[in-house]
Image (cartoon, rainbow, N blue to C red):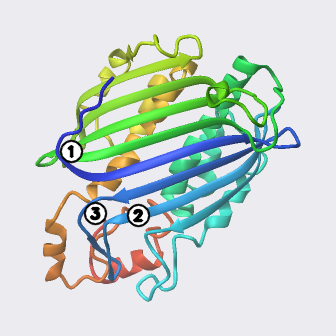
């Protein structure tokens, strides 16, 4: 499936999850979310957020593959939206970062998402780490199952050798006035166990790709045209494997709002089909990516706030994250200015 971008580039969100072997038979897991804004600037919290890298955040942990248990988990936030300042009363996106450690000992099963949300969801943490955490949990569970299917229960690997890598890259383009095209590409790469020095393709076990092309209308956030396809390739059919159209699996999304409530609907529709998990995981990443694209859509915001007395200016939904939690510094500042939640 070929993806053809249309319109002005707005934003790229890239997420990755990597599993690697350890000497003790367990697995290291690393996740990354990177947001790259491609135009404009946003007035917010007494400052200006420009283009370039907006978020650069990481998760790192250890997995016991025998029990599918995440034994340790820690977070790192290299680039965040809000550093401590007078406007934030010294608060920062990093303040609740240690709450992620509460997930140590959690199984990577159907309850992972709920436990993750209980630990860092909404006002308790960072929405971007939450998104990355959801992807990390489902990707790791998928990888463990495919690893067993491809190579057995405990294949021998040298320490540090990669087992699996998933990348989800979503590009947003302003295809027309008040319309955003989202192009999503998910690539799963499964690595074959091998010695320390081998030819590159001896490491190839399997590749699974998912591609989506969606258009979203503003301000309703209604999904218009949506195309989807996937392709799985192994060593034997690397050249011959064909793309499989998945239009029938996503047709119901036409006209749906890509906002609050869409996650529950996606899980209800696709969550019971294990083979559809990569497609589901890709679809689940669209709404958070769209939020990032929206910040680059309007050149009217700087003009509007040029004469506005507000220090807070652009803001997030109440309780959407720690920084915009009810009663937090930014929420109090917004209330003092008489501003309403957007």
- Graded by Cα atoms within 10 Å as few (under 14), some (14 to 19) or many (20 or more), the crowding at tag 2 reads some
**Does residue 277 appear to the left or right of 153 in the view shown?**
left
- Graded by Cα atoms within 10 Å as few (under 14), some (14 to 19) or many (20 or more), the crowding at tag 3 reads few
Viewer-nearest residue: 130 or 205: 205
Q: Nearer the viewer, mark 2 or mark 1?
A: 2
Q: Nearer the viewer, mark 2 or mark 3?
A: 2
Q: Secondary structure at mark 2?
A: strand
Residue 24 percent coordinates (x, y) = 88, 42
Q: Which mark is residue 8?
A: none
Between disc 2 and disc 3, whose residue precedes? 2
Viewer-nearest residue: 176 or 164: 164
- Report if residue 281 is visible in the image: yes
Residue 12 percent coordinates (x, y) = 36, 50
Vertical placement of residue 268 versus 89, above or below: above
Vertical placement of residue 17 versus 327, above or below: above
Q: In the image, what residue occupies the spot 16% across and 81% down?
A: 306
Between disc 2 and disc 1, whose residue precedes? 2
Residue 289 percent coordinates (x, y) = 37, 48
- Report if residue 260 is visible in the image: no
Quarter of the image with the C terminus is: bottom left
Q: Secondary structure at mark 3?
A: loop
Residue bearing the label numbered 1: 220
Q: Quadrant of residue 17?
A: top right
Q: CA distance from mark 2 to mark 3?
A: 24 Å
Residue bearing the label numbered 2: 53
Residue 102 percent coordinates (x, y) = 72, 56
Q: In the image, what residue occupies the spot 43% across and 21% down?
A: 230
Q: Residue furthest bottom?
A: 86
Q: CA distance from mark 2 to mark 1?
A: 27 Å
- Graded by Cα atoms within 10 Å as few (under 14), some (14 to 19) or many (20 or more), the crowding at tag 1 reads few
Residue bearing the label numbered 3: 342
């Amino acid at each position: 499936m070929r993806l053809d971008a249309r319109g002005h580039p707005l934003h790229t969100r890239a997420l990755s999850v990597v599993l690697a072997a350890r000497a003790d038979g367990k697995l290291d897991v690393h996740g990354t979310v990177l947001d790259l804004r491609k135009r404009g600037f946003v007035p917010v919290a007494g400052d200006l957020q420009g283009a370039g890298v907006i978020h650069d955040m990481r998760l790192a942990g250890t997995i016991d593959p025998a029990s599918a248990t995440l034994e340790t988990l820690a977070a790192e936030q290299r680039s965040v939206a809000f550093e401590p300042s007078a406007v934030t009363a010294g608060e920062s996106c990093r303040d609740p970062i240690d709450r992620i450690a509460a997930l140590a000992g959690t199984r990577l099963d159907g309850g992972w998402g709920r436990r993750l949300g209980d630990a860092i969801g909404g006002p308790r943490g960072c929405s971007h780490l939450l998104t990355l955490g959801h992807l990390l949990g489902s990707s790791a569970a998928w990888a463990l199952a495919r690893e067993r299917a491809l190579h057995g229960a405990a294949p021998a690997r040298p320490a540090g050798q990669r087992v699996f890598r998933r990348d989800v890259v979503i590009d947003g383009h302003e295809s027309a006035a008040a319309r955003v095209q989202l192009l999503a590409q998910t690539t799963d790469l499964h690595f074959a166990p091998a010695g320390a020095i081998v030819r590159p393709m001896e490491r190839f076990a399997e590749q699974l790709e998912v591609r989506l092309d969606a258009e979203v209308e503003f301000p309703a956030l209604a999904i218009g045209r949506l195309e989807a396809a996937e392709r799985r390739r192994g060593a034997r059919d690397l050249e011959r494997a064909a793309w499989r159209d998945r239009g029938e699996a996503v047709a119901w999304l036409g006209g749906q709002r890509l906002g609050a409530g869409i996650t529950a609907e996606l899980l209800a529709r696709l969550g019971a089909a294990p083979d559809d998990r990569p497609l589901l995981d890709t679809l689940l990443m669209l709404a958070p990516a769209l939020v990032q694209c929206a910040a680059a859509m309007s050149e009217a915001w700087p003009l509007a706030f040029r004469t506005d007395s507000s220090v807070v200016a652009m803001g997030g939904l109440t309780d959407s994250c720690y920084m915009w939690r009810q009663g937090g510094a930014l929420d109090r500042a917004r209330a003092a200015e008489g501003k309403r939640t957007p």
